[in-house]
Image: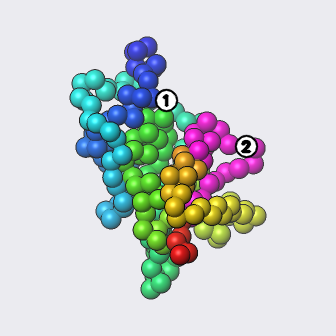
Amino acid sequence: MASAQVQSLDIIKQQDQQHQLDNINKHHHHHHEGVPLECNSPKPIDEEIYQVEYKHPLEHVWTLWYLEYNRSKHWKDMLNEITEIDSVETFWSLYHTIKSPAELKSGCDYAVFKKGIKPMWEDEANIKGGRWLVTVNKSAKAELDKIWLDILLLMRFGLPTGVTKWPFWRSDRS
């Protein structure tokens, strides 16, 4: 059991795509068809090598939302609750399974909020909220993905006092 507790995040990063999708679908019931899933993992790893006996829980449970903009739909109908992120293992599995923000088509966004908070102004938790907009040049897509990972890691290891959500909106204004 102790060896599972100290298992390196490098091993977690190397899970194969099928194993990741199976874990997400098995443990999280909010996976939707049409969500941009893609494996960023460099090489598959044998399932016998990667057996998690113990999950490393996060301080807070987070929800990943996906929005695909469509003018003919109401905002609420464009939002899809994808999954909950409750452990280090779920975090890395999801991170290496979904497309990075730079790979999303224009008009598609991710939002990550604490469990129970919806990514809309009408949610009681957002009434006095705000948002950050980060503009990144089209030629700096790698920088966009680095910012995304930095925000997710902040979320995983703890946020500054008073921060309850990190929406991440992407648009192409070229």
Kind of residue at badge 2: Pro
Which image quadrant is residue 51 in?
Answer: top left
Residue 59 rendering spot, x and y as whole percentages: 60, 36
Is 167 situated above or below 54? below
Question: What residue span does the magenta drawing correspond to?
Answer: 150-169
The answer to whether mark 1 and mark 2 are in CB contact below 8 A is: no
Question: Within 10 Å of the Cα at label 1, are there few (<14), some (14-19), or many (20+) other Cα atoms?
Answer: some
State yes or no: residue 160 in magenta.
yes
Q: Earlier in the sequence, mark 1 or mark 2?
A: 1
Question: Label 1, on which residue?
Answer: 56
The secondary element bearing badge 2 is classed as loop
For the residue marked with disc 1, what is the amino acid?
Answer: His
How many residues crowd around disc 2 within 10 Å: few (fewer than 14), some, or many (20 or more)?
few
Label 1, secondary structure: give it: loop
Give the vertical position of 2 relative to 44 (above or below): above
Q: Farthest residue to the front: give it.
A: 139
Task: Check residue 38 for magenta coloring.
Answer: no
Q: Residue at x 55, y 52 (%)?
A: 143
Taking the image as shown, residue 168 lies to the left or right of residue 40, namely right
Where residue 168 sits, quadrant-wise, is bottom right
Q: Which mark is residue 72?
A: none
